[in-house]
Amino acid sequence: MKHKSVCIIGGTGFVGRHIAYRLSKTDKKVRVLTRNAEKNKDLRILPGVELIETDVFDTRQLEATIRDTDAVINLVGILNEKQHNGEGFHRAHVELPKKILGACLSQGVPRLLHMSALHADVNTGTSLYLRTKGEGENALHTFSTERLVVTSFRPSVIFGPGDSFLNRFAGLLKTLPLAFPLACPNSRFAPVFVGDVADRFVQALDDKSTYGQRYDLCGPEEYTLKELVEYTAHLLELNRRVIGLPDWMSKAQANVLEWFPGKPFSIDNYKSLQIDSICKHNQHEPTSLEMVAPTYLGQKNRYYINDDYRKTARRS
Ligand SMILES: NC(=O)c1ccc[n+]([C@@H]2O[C@H](COP(=O)([O-])OP(=O)(O)OC[C@H]3O[C@@H](n4cnc5c(N)ncnc54)[C@H](OP(=O)(O)O)[C@@H]3O)[C@@H](O)[C@H]2O)c1
């Protein structure tokens, strides 16, 4: 079956915008749901993209907005909660996917793509983030039937224009003179390009071989967190010494920053970093960090948004 209209929940974010952009180049109609349409009104310029302000936690509103679509993509996720007790994680990663599942079943939507995270596991996840992501993912796959087929994606950290990973370190590097104290410096990542992730979502929509599957997504190379921050400083042409903190200081930093506005680094983030965010299998997405990061992080480079980042990113 070809899915002609797609509703993206969480489609205003970093990954969602890349998926919406790609879908706008197809013959599919795209509906992006948001809590704040005014803030995201630029998405309306994409052909075939409709932006709707709604409360996705309100079952009636959710059902009304997905009623006439034939596929839903759920991208809602949070790295930190306002609370300190897991309620926020549970709401975003478990309660919401269950509501979306119920709404798809009641409204006859036959296809659901879901964004989880690498190493999400309700039992063995090292953090609330990973355990709740695992619980939400399981809930969807347990109920996946012929009436509603689910596919989940489980990426390592995602990079690309607009990311909140390298860009966050870039911001911190610019404000901290001389030295950068880095928690969990030896944690490993296999950063995956947002364009590759978006491609996987778009391709999976109508690809029967993906029905019911869960895919780990990693980029072609692995790096320690320290290497990634040093690389960011290099691209920004900043002379900073990145000082890796020992474990007890990393934990102490998390315990302090947990209470800062916006939680720049939380205890739960520290716990997520206790497992390397790398894939076991040998299949990796093609685009490397070195191909793309210089186009949006380097001071002398400018990024040009276009169809295909790999071809159109170029130096100014
Ligand atoms: N970025 C990464 O490196 C990475 C790695 C692994 C997994 N993931 C997962 O991939 C997904 C997308 O990530 P992203 O980086 O694109 O995130 P993002 O930029 O923060 O976007 C998430 C979107 O979800 C919506 N949202 C957030 N909290 C919500 C809430 N409480 N209620 C309703 N909507 C809410 C927001 O839309 P509105 O504000 O418009 O309502 C936001 O645009 C997430 O599930 C994340 O956990 C990301």
Image (cartoon, grey):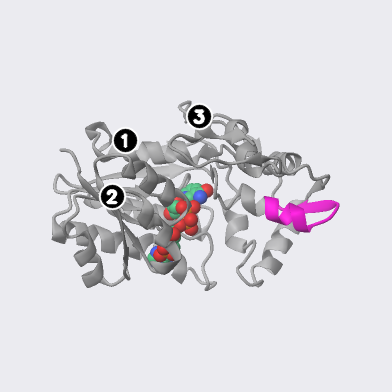
Q: Secondary structure at mark 1?
A: helix
Residue linked to disc 2: 48
Residue 108 at x, y percent in the picture: 13, 55
Separation (CA) of disc 3 from disc 2: 24 Å
Asked if residue 174 can be seen in this view, the reply is: yes
Alpha-carbon neighbours of circle 2 within 10 Å: few (<14), some, or many (≥20)?
A: some
Look at the image and give the residue range highlighted in magenta: 170-183
Say which quadrant the N terminus sits in. Answer: top left
Label 3 vs 2, first from the N-terminus: 2
Residue displayed at 54% across by 50% down: 162
Mark 3 or 1 closer to N-term?
1
In the image, residue 59 lies in the stretch drawn in magenta: no
Q: Label 1, label 2: how many angstroms apart (C-alpha)?
A: 18 Å
Q: Quadrant of residue 154?
A: top left
Is the residue 250 above or below the residue 166 in the image? below
Question: In the rendering, at what x and y percent does residue 23 appear?
Answer: 32, 43
Residue for badge 1: 203
Marks 1 & 2, CB-CB < 8 Å contact:
no
* Amino acid of disc 3: Lys
Mark 1, other Cα within 10 Å: few <14 / some 14–19 / many ≥20? few
The quarter of the picture showing ligand 1: bottom left
What residue is drawn where x is 24% and y is 41%?
A: 27
* Location of mark 3 (residue): 311
Assign the C terminus to one quadrant of the image.
top right
**From this viewpoint, is residue 91 visible?**
no
Task: Determine crowd level at label 3: few under 14, some 14-19, many 20+ residues with C-alpha closer than 10 A.
Answer: few
